[in-house]
Image (spheres, rainbow, N blue to C red):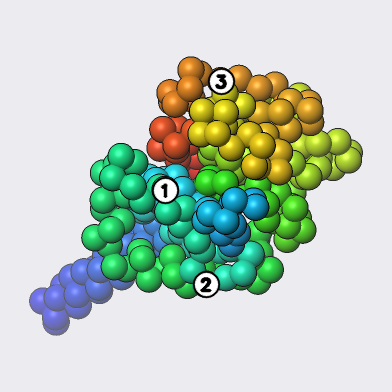
Amino acid sequence: MKYIMSVLAVIILVTACTMKQEKSNKSKSQIEENSTKKVLFVLTSHDQLGNTGKKTGFWIEEFAAPFYALKDKNVEITLASPKGGQPPIDPKSEGENFQTPATKRFKGDAATQKLLANTLKLSDVKEADYDAVFYPGGHGPLWDLSEDKNSIKLIESFYNNNKPVAAVCHAPAVLKNVKSIDGTPLVQGKKVTGFTNSEEEAVQLTTVVPFLVETMLKDNGGIFSRADDWNVHAVKDGLLITGQNPASSEKVAELLLESLAD
């Protein structure tokens, strides 16, 4: 009898330990799942370069480099654009001289190409579903996203709910009409950067674009800083992260990852 009782005690003890371990593993799995960060990428739907008859859109490297930098850190990424579907890629950004490891990876990545071809409509996304928002550049955002009411409202919602807002190159243009709670420009008194006037002059588009990113940020009270043309420069001021040019896109992603980890 004593032997039987001893055996039962051992069985109960082993069963209890197993259940405790399973519960612990389940809790760990839930924590890991809950800690997965979600970032919304917002891309332009505009493909006309002013009245030049040439095409524009978003700059592929400014999408690819941050996309993979975040994805490789297990960040879940959702893509959206004002019109939904395939956002236009600036044809110049696909030139051989502008290829990087990230763009080459994208060209061989059928899954990400499919994801890009099926972006959500911007009007259908909600800030509450994401931990941060990122805007790739290219000249397209100067025309549509800088004036898009859904984009403006979305950025204000992210910022006011203590979530990072990041943009690179021409994409800080999306901050043009974004306001703080007190009605002043969001960038007022904040350290920012973006595609410089001299860089715009170098690509001979100062008279084509609807406004200059550097000038707009300064006019809105931003504390603008820059590196020499085409050099890496990114700035983080609280929740606001901005990068100067295509070369700065990966640095912006690094700063965004830091913010998500805070």
Q: CA distance from mark 3 to mark 1?
A: 24 Å
In this rendering, does residue 28 appear at all? yes
Packing grade of label 1 (10 A; few <14, some 14-19, many >=20) is some
**What percent of the width, then of the height, locates residue 210?**
71, 43
Q: Please tell me which residue lies in front, 98 or 255.
A: 98
Packing grade of label 2 (10 A; few <14, some 14-19, many >=20) is some
Task: From the image, state whether disc 3 or disc 1 is nearer to you.
Answer: 1
**What percent of the width, then of the height, locates residue 127?**
65, 59
**What percent of the width, then of the height, locates residue 46?**
60, 59
Q: Please tell me which residue lies in front, 185 or 83.
A: 83
C-beta proximity under 8 Å, tags 3 and 2: no
Label 2 sits on residue: 85
**Mark 1 residue type:** Lys
C-beta proximity under 8 Å, tags 3 and 1: no
Provide the secondary structure element on which disc 2 rests: loop
Q: CA distance from mark 1 to mark 2?
A: 21 Å
Q: Quadrant of the N terminus?
A: bottom left
Provide the secondary structure element on which disc 3 rests: loop
Q: Is residue 213 above or below residue 84?
A: above
**Mark 3 residue type:** Arg
**Residue at (70, 49) in percent of width and height:** 146
In terms of image quadrants, where is residue 248? top left
Provide the secondary structure element on which disc 1 rests: helix
Report whether 42 appears left or right of 26. Answer: right
In this rendering, does residue 243 appear at all? no
Label 3 sits on residue: 226
Report whether 224 appears left or right of 130. Answer: right
**Residue at (55, 34) in percent of width and height:** 204
Question: Tag 2 or tag 3, which sits nearer the N-term?
Answer: 2
Label 1 sits on residue: 92
**What percent of the width, then of the height, locates residue 246?**
44, 37
Question: Tag 2 or tag 1, which sits nearer the N-term?
Answer: 2
